[in-house]
């Protein structure tokens, strides 16, 4: 007999509590490791908690719409047989909330640092220690797109997550907007931080930049992890999304655009919308995104990249057949040896919609 706790997860460095939206399993149901268990809403996003253990669901301790602190006991699984008294004793002995804290101040939260990269001020999020992993976000995003991933990896790696030029809190100048220029800026950041031979993970436009970085500065990149990347054979590029962001004037326009990124529109929270709205209102932001959009749609950078895929280092691809932004790549046209993982429970943002699976795949590369 084994009694196992289900606790409110900590998704992201700033998360303190979560709201139960819906239990996806009922009392008495068998639960396998990896099963979708609970939909939970935070101030950042609505996400699904997946089971980390197997067993039978015997108690639900927090119902729909209840707000619970991170680490709180919200359910109980039993593997084998357990009496009601045993289960009650387990619950009584469980602390109200258990939050695993990292040792040392540096890994307990995300440190923000401004790096001068080729004359541009680049905002960089830093967390953890150990082997380096670099996280590059996509078009119109920022380092917070990786909030769950940073939380997942900071205990085993030195995580470097910059706001790309033209995005977030970084300078809005993007030069000519080419992949080579963007990759050069990332390289300058890594040089300044003394990072080399790192795992580099890139999402969407960030995936294309990651590939360009590996080609231009192979000393910086040991392995690639491409999360729904732009530029692969057989993929598409949604100008509906790109244009909607570049021309957005109101929060509702931004929300409609962001909902294209995800399989479940309810995933898009007010906080996500507000973050993009704030960025778009900064001087030069929409002009920078407009230039990047033009370069992406013009296509010559992406075509040149596709011609050199065989030169890339060990590469892991994470993709979805439900990606409405870059589509599903033609895996038969990829170089031999690529490791391909389909996360069809997600749309274009698996690092948010299937955070635990993305985190597990990236941990394997470190």
Image: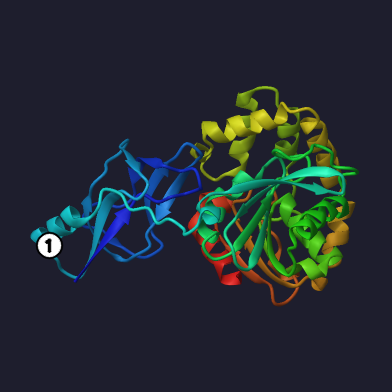
In which quarter of the view is residue 251 placed?
top right
Q: Residue furthest top?
A: 250
Residue at figure coordinates x 30%, y 37% from the top left: 66
Residue 114's spot in the image, x, y percent? Answer: 73, 45
Residue 349's spot in the image, x, y percent? Answer: 59, 49
Label 1: few (<14), some or many (≥20) within 10 Å?
A: few
Residue at figure coordinates x 30%, y 52% from the top left: 25
For the image, the number of numbered tags is 1
The answer to whether residue 54 is visible is yes
Residue at figure coordinates x 73%, y 63% from the top left: 195
Q: Quadrant of the C terminus?
A: bottom right
Q: Residue furthest front?
A: 104
Q: Which residue is mark 1?
A: 86
Residue 38's spot in the image, x, y percent? Answer: 36, 49
On screen, 251 above or below 229? Answer: above
Residue 10 lies left or right of residue 237; in this view the side is left
């Amino acid at each position: 007999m084994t009694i196992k706790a289900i606790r409110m997860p900590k998704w992201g460095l700033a998360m303190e509590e979560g709201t139960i939206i819906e239990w996806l399993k009922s009392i008495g149901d068998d639960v396998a490791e990896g099963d979708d268990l609970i939909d939970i809403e935070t101030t950042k996003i609505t996400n699904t908690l997946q089971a980390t253990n197997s067993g039978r669901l015997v108690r639900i301790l927090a119902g729909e719409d209840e707000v619970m602190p991170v680490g709180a006991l919200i359910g109980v699984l039993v593997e084998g047989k357990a009496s009601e008294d045993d289960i009650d004793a387990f619950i009584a002995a469980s602390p109200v909330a258990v939050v695993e804290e990292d040792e040392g101040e540096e890994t307990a939260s995300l440190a923000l640092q401004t790096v001068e990269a080729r004359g541009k001020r680049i905002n960089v999020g830093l967390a953890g220690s150990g082997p380096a992993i670099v996280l590059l976000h996509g078009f119109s995003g920022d380092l917070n797109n990786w909030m769950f991933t940073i939380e997942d990896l900071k205990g085993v790696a030195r995580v470097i997550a910059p706001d790309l030029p033209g995005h977030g809190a970084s300078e809005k100048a993007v030069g000519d907007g080419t992949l080579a220029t963007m990759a050069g800026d990332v390289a300058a950041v890594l040089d300044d931080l003394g990072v080399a031979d790192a795992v580099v993970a890139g999402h969407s436009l960030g995936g294309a930049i990651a590939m360009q970085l590996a080609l231009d500065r192979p000393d910086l990149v040991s392995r690639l992890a491409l999360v729904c990347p732009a530029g692969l054979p057989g993929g598409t590029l949604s100008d509906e999304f790109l244009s909607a962001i570049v021309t957005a004037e109101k929060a509702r326009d931004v929300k409609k655009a962001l909902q294209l990124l995800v399989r479940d529109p309810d995933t898009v929270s007010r906080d996500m919308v507000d973050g993009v709205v704030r960025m778009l209102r900064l001087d030069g932001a929409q002009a920078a995104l407009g230039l990047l959009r033009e370069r992406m749609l013009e296509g010559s950078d992406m075509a040149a990249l596709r011609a050199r895929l065989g030169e890339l280092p060990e590469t892991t691809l994470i993709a979805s057949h439900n990606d409405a932004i870059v589509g599903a790549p033609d895996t038969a046209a990829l170089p031999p040896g690529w490791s391909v993982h389909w996360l069809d429970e997600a749309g274009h943002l698996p690092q948010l919609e299937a955070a635990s699976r993305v985190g597990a795949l990236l941990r394997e590369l470190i």
